Image (tube, rainbow, N blue to C red):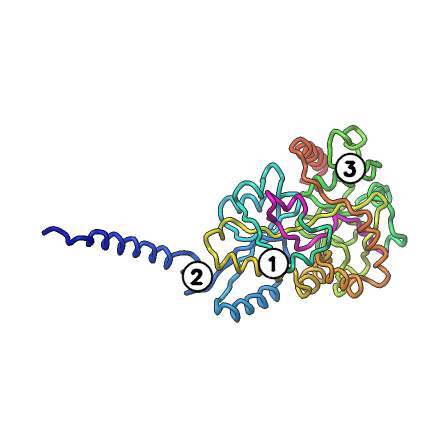
C-alpha cells in the first residue's frame, strides 16, 4: 500500500527529532544533572584548598541545585599541562605565564584551550594593572589566561645564621655557605638566570644564551649545583630548609603561623629577582558542555575574590595576590612587621620570566643537566 502524502516527511521529522532529543539527553552536561558535575583540575599544589572547594561547591549547589565535584591533580612539571590537555584529561589548568606561547605547547593557538569570556569573570578588572591583557595571555584580541597568583624565584636566608640581609645572588657562591643552601632541581632555566645575574649580566640578557654563554657562566652553574646542600622539587617545604643558611624559594613571604619558617626571611638582591605569574586556562574539553563551562568561569572569578587570594593562597603559600584590594590588605596585615619597604623593592626589581626560544631553552637545559651529572646529589 502506498504511503499517504506527507507521511514519509513526518516519519523523517520524527526520526530526526528522536536523534536530537537523544543527543541532548546523553550530552555530558545533561547526564551530569543526575549525578552532579565534575571539573578536573591540574594545578600547582595549594591553589585549590579544601575550604575553597567546599565553599564554591556550596555556592553552586545553592545557585543551580547541582552537586559540583572536583578531581584535583597537582602538577609537578611544566610538561604536565600540555600532555594532560592533549589527552583530554583536564578541564582547568594553571600553567605559568611563560608557557602559554612556548613553542613546545602553543596553548593559545593549538586548539587545546578556550578563550575566556571576561563578562563572566568580572573580578578580572580588579587585577593589578601590570597583569591586565598581557601579550602572553592574548590571541587575536581574546584572553586565554587569567592570573591567579604570582611571585618570585627568590633568595631566602636564615636569620639565625645570617644576621645581615644578603644584597646579591653572589652569596650562593660564597665558600662559607658551601653545602648550606638549597636550590630547585628541575627548573634549570631559573638557576641559569640567577647565575647570569650574579655574573653581572643585565636582566634583558639573561633569557638569551648567546648573550651570556662562555666559560664563566659554565663554571658558575657547575659550582651552584656542586655546592648545593640539597635540591628541592615542586613547591618548597619546611624540610627543604632544615640546617640550611640560604635557599631559593617560590615564596614572597613565609607563613608566620608555621614554626619551621619563623627564622626565614626574603632577601632583595640588587641584581633583581625573576617573577612567575600562574594563570588559569580552560581546556577544550568544556567546549560542548555549556553548564560546566559557565561554572568554570565562575570558579575563575571566585579565585580572584579577596577571600581566596588572601586566606587560601597568600596566607598559606606565601605567594603574592594578583588583585589590587587583596595586595593592599596583604601588605598591611600578612607581611611581617617592617617588610613593606622590602616588598616594594622586590617589585621594583621585578624581572618577569620570558618565553624562551627553543635554542636558548635547550642550551640552558644542557648546561644544568651537565652540572647535575657532576654531583651525586643531583642525580
Placement of the C terminus among the 4 image quadrants: top right
Quarter holding residue 305: bottom right
Give the secondary structure at mark 1: loop
Q: Which is more toward the observer, 277 or 227?
A: 277
The residue at which mark 1 appears reads as: 121
Q: Which residue corresponds to the image point at 71% horizontal and 63% vertical from the top-left?
A: 310
Give the secondary structure at mark 3: loop
Q: Which of disc 3 and disc 1 is earlier in sequence?
A: 1
Badge number at residue 204: 3
Q: How many labels does the image show?
A: 3
Q: Distance between the residues labelled 1 and 2?
A: 23 Å
Q: Which is more toward the observer, 223 or 167?
A: 167
Give the secondary structure at mark 2: helix
Q: Residue 323: x percent and y percent?
A: 71, 58
Q: How far apart are marks 1 and 3 (CA)?
A: 34 Å
Q: Is 7 situated left or right of 60 in this image?
A: left
Q: Which is more toward the observer, 339 or 355?
A: 355
The residue at which mark 2 appears reads as: 32
Q: Is 71 situated left or right of 329 in this image?
A: left
Q: Which residue corresponds to the image point at 56% horizontal and 58% vertical from the top-left?
A: 297
Q: Quick one: which residue is furthest to the bottom in this view?
A: 62
Q: Give the range drawn in magenta.
A: 134-160
Q: Which residue corresponds to the image point at 51% horizontal and 56% vertical from the top-left?
A: 293
Q: Which residue corresponds to the image point at 62% horizontal and 48% vertical from the top-left?
A: 95
Amino acid at each position: 500500500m502506498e504511503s499517504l502524502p506527507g507521511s514519509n516527511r513526518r516519519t523523517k521529522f520524527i526520526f530526526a527529532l528522536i536523534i536530537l532529543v537523544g543527543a541532548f539527553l546523553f550530552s555530558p552536561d545533561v547526564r551530569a544533572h543526575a549525578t552532579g558535575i565534575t571539573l578536573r583540575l591540574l594545578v600547582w599544589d595549594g591553589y585549590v584548598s579544601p575550604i575553597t572547594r567546599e565553599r564554591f561547591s556550596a555556592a553552586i549547589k545553592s545557585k543551580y541545585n547541582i552537586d559540583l565535584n572536583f578531581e584535583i591533580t597537582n602538577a609537578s612539571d611544566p610538561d604536565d599541562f600540555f600532555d594532560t590537555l592533549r589527552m583530554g584529561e583536564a578541564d582547568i589548568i594553571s600553567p605559568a605565564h611563560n608557557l602559554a606561547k612556548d613553542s613546545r605547547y602553543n596553548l593559545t593557538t593549538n586548539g587545546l584551550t578556550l578563550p575566556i569570556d571576561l563578562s563572566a569573570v568580572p573580578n578580572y578588572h580588579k587585577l593589578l594593572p601590570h597583569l591586565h591583557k598581557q601579550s602572553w595571555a592574548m590571541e587575536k584580541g581574546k584572553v586565554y589566561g587569567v592570573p591567579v597568583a604570582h611571585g618570585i624565584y627568590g633568595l631566602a636566608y636564615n636569620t639565625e645564621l645570617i644576621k645581615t640581609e644578603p644584597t646579591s645572588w653572589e652569596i650562593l657562591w660564597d665558600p662559607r655557605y658551601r653545602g648550606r643552601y638549597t636550590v630547585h632541581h628541575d627548573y634549570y632555566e631559573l638557576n641559569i638566570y640567577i647565575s647570569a645575574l650574579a655574573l653581572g649580566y643585565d636582566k634583558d640578557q639573561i633569557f638569551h644564551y648567546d648573550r651570556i654563554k662562555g666559560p664563566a657562566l659554565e663554571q658558575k652553574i657547575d659550582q651552584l649545583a656542586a655546592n648545593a646542600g640539597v635540591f628541592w622539587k615542586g613547591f618548597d617545604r619546611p624540610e627543604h630548609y632544615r640546617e640550611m643558611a640560604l635557599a631559593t624559594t617560590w615564596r614572597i613571604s613565609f607563613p608566620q603561623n608555621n614554626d619551621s619558617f619563623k627564622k626565614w626571611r626574603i632577601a632583595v638582591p640588587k641584581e633583581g629577582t625573576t617573577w612567575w605569574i600562574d594563570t588559569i586556562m580552560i581546556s577544550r574539553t568544556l567546549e560542548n558542555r555549556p553548564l560546566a563551562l559557565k561554572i568554570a568561569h565562575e570558579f575563575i572569578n571566585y579565585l580572584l575574590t579577596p577571600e581566596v587570594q588572601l586566606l587560601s593562597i597568600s596566607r598559606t603559600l606565601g605567594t603574592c595576590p594578583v588583585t589590587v584590594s587583596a595586595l593592599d590588605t596583604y601588605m598591611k596585615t600578612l607581611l611581617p612587621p617592617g617588610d613593606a619597604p622590602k616588598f616594594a623593592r622586590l617589585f621594583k626589581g621585578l624581572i618577569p620570566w620570558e618565553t624562551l626560544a627553543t635554542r636558548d631553552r635547550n642550551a640552558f637545559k644542557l648546561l644544568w643537566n651537565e652540572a647535575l651529572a657532576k654531583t651525586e646529589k643531583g642525580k
